[in-house]
Amino acid sequence: MGKNRYTDAAKRAAIWHHEYLKKMRSCRFDTIAVHGIYSMQEALDFNQGSIIEPIYMSTSQAYRDSDEMEAALGYEIPTWCYSRIANPSVYYLEGVLALLEGYGSEVETSCVATSSGMSAIQSAVDPFLVTLQGQTNKPMNFVATAQVYGGTFQQFAIRKQQERNIGWRKVIHSSDMKEWENLIDENTRFLYGELPSNPCQGFFDIRALADLAHKYNLPLIVDSTVATPALLRPLAYGADIVVQSVTKSMSSSGFGICGAVISKKNITSSIENEEMKSDFAGYLKLLPNRDNGPNISPMNSILALNDIRTLRTKMDLFSRSTLKVARFLEQHKHVEKVEYLGLESHPLHSLASSYLYLADSEFDELYPGKVNRYGHLMSFLINGDALKTRKVFDAMTMIWRATDLGRIKSVATIPAISTHSQQGEEGRKQAGIPSNLIRLCVGGEHPDDIIKDLDSALSVLDGKKINVSYPEYSAGGASSARIND
Ligand SMILES: *Cc1c(COP(=O)(O)O)cnc(C)c1O
C-alpha cells in the first residue's frame, strides 16, 4: 500500500476539481464571485453541509499515518499541512480571485493570497531580483511608473534602491511607450505599472506595454487595485502578473488588510527557473512565501471573500456615483481641476475607455451593451494653497478623513500630508501630487448626500462657518440609558 493509496486518491480528486473549475469558468462573473471554488460536494463531504465557506482557525492539519504525512509534505497530495503555507479558508479566497482575474479570457490563472497589498508586491517582485550567472558585478534594475501608491514608492525607493542598490528607473509619462523602452537594458528584471494610479489616475496601454516587456524577455507586473477585476483584467491583455491590495475596493467593508498575487501560466522572464515561470503564484505559495511567511489569516480571507461576492454590482454603483460627484466638482468655482478617468476632460479618458468596462454589462438588461466604468477613486485640486485645502478638508462632515480608499463609506485624504508624505517634495512632483490635491473615494451612500457635504465644505472658502459638534457619549453605549428626550 504505502503512499500510493493517498497519491491515487489525490489524482482522482484532481480530475474532479478540474472538472468543477471548468464548470465554474463557464459561469458569469457574479456567479463565480458568489460561489467561487466552494462546491456543494465540498460542503457536504467535508464541511457538514455548511453553505458558507468555514473559517478554519487552525494552525495545522493532522494526518492518518506516516505515509499520508510524507505525501502531503512532499506536495504529492492536496494538503494544507500548516497555515503559513496553506489553509482551506485561504484557498477559497485564492480560488475565487484566480477565477475572477482570468474571467472572460482563455488565460489560465493561479493566485496566492498575502497579508497585505504591500506583501503581495514584495512577493511578486522579489523572485526577479536575484543575481544571474555572469552578471555578479552589475547592479540590477526594474522599470516602473513613478505614479504609484505611497507605500509602493517607499518599498521601491528605500527598500530596493537605497538599501539594496537595485535601480528603480521611473517612468514619468506612463502612456509613452518610448519612455519605457529607453529605460530598459540587459540588467532590467521586470516592468511594473500601476493603473489607474493612486491618486493621480495614470494609465497606459497594457497590450502595448506587455508586448514591449516580452520583446525584452521580461515580465509585466500590474497593480490593478483601483480597478479590481470587475472593471479590468490585465492578464487578458498580456500582463504576466497582477498584484491586488484586496484591502481596498475588493473588501469594501473595511474589516482588515489583505493582498494577492495572481499570475498566468508560463510567464515571460529571462531568469532560468522553470518552476517559477510555469506557475508563478503556485511557486510563490509553496516555496518563497513558505520561507518568508507573508501569509494571510483564515479569518481575514473569509471576510474578504464575503465582500467579493457582490464586487461587480458595488463597483458599478460606486463608479456611477463617482462620475456624478466628479461632474459636480468640475464645475465648482473653488475647484481648480478634477482628475478622474471617467471625465471626458481627462487626457487619458479615451485610452482608459478602451480598457475599463463593467464586466458583463452587455448581459445586464439595465444597459444597452458594454458600458465603461472607471472606479471610485478620484482627486480634485482646490483653487488655492495648502491651507485652504486643509480648511475644506476639515469641513467635511460625512466624508471620513482617513488614509484609506475603496470603502463602502466615502473617505478622503490629502496625500501630500499622509499617504505620500514620506516621499518628499521631489517624489511628489514626479508623481504629480501637489499640496492642494484631495483624494476622494466615493462609497455607497447616495451621491447627492456626498455632493451636499462637499458643497458645504467648499463653502468655507466663501467665509462660511461649519459647526461640528460632538456628543459626549457614543451611540453605541446609549441603549443602556433610560433617558427621556
Ligand atoms: C493600498 C494600496 C496598496 C497597498 O496595499 P495594503 O493592503 O495597504 O498593503 C498597493 N497598491 C495600491 C494601488 C493601493 O491603493
Image (cartoon, rainbow, N blue to C red):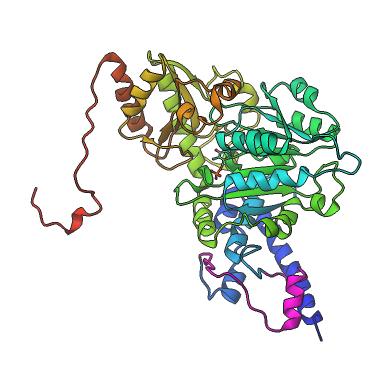
Farthest residue to the right: give it: 134
Which residue is painted at 83% across and 35% down in the image? 214
The answer to which quarter of the image holds residue 427 is top right
Q: Say above or below: 73 vs 333.
A: below
Residue 205 image position (x, y, % from top left): 70, 28
Q: Point out the quarter of the image occupied by ligand 1.
A: top right
Which residue is painted at 82% across and 55% down in the image? 275
**Left-right relation of 281 to 378:** right
Q: Which residues are magenta?
A: 52-79
Nearest the eye: 282 or 252: 282
The answer to which quarter of the image holds residue 35 is bottom right
Residue 181 image position (x, y, % from top left): 79, 24
The answer to which quarter of the image holds residue 352 is top right
Nearest the eye: 230 or 246: 246
Residue 118 image position (x, y, % from top left): 60, 44
Residue 102 image position (x, y, % from top left): 69, 47
Whether residue 214 is visible, yes or no, is yes
Name the chief secondary structure element in magenta: loop
Q: Say above or below: 125 vs 442.
A: below
**Residue 309 lies in the magenta-colored region:** no
Which residue is painted at 62% across and 48% down in the image? 119
Farthest residue to the bottom: give it: 1
- Image quadrant where one finds the N terminus: bottom right
Q: Say above or below: 291 vs 219.
A: below
**Left-right relation of 81 to 131:** left
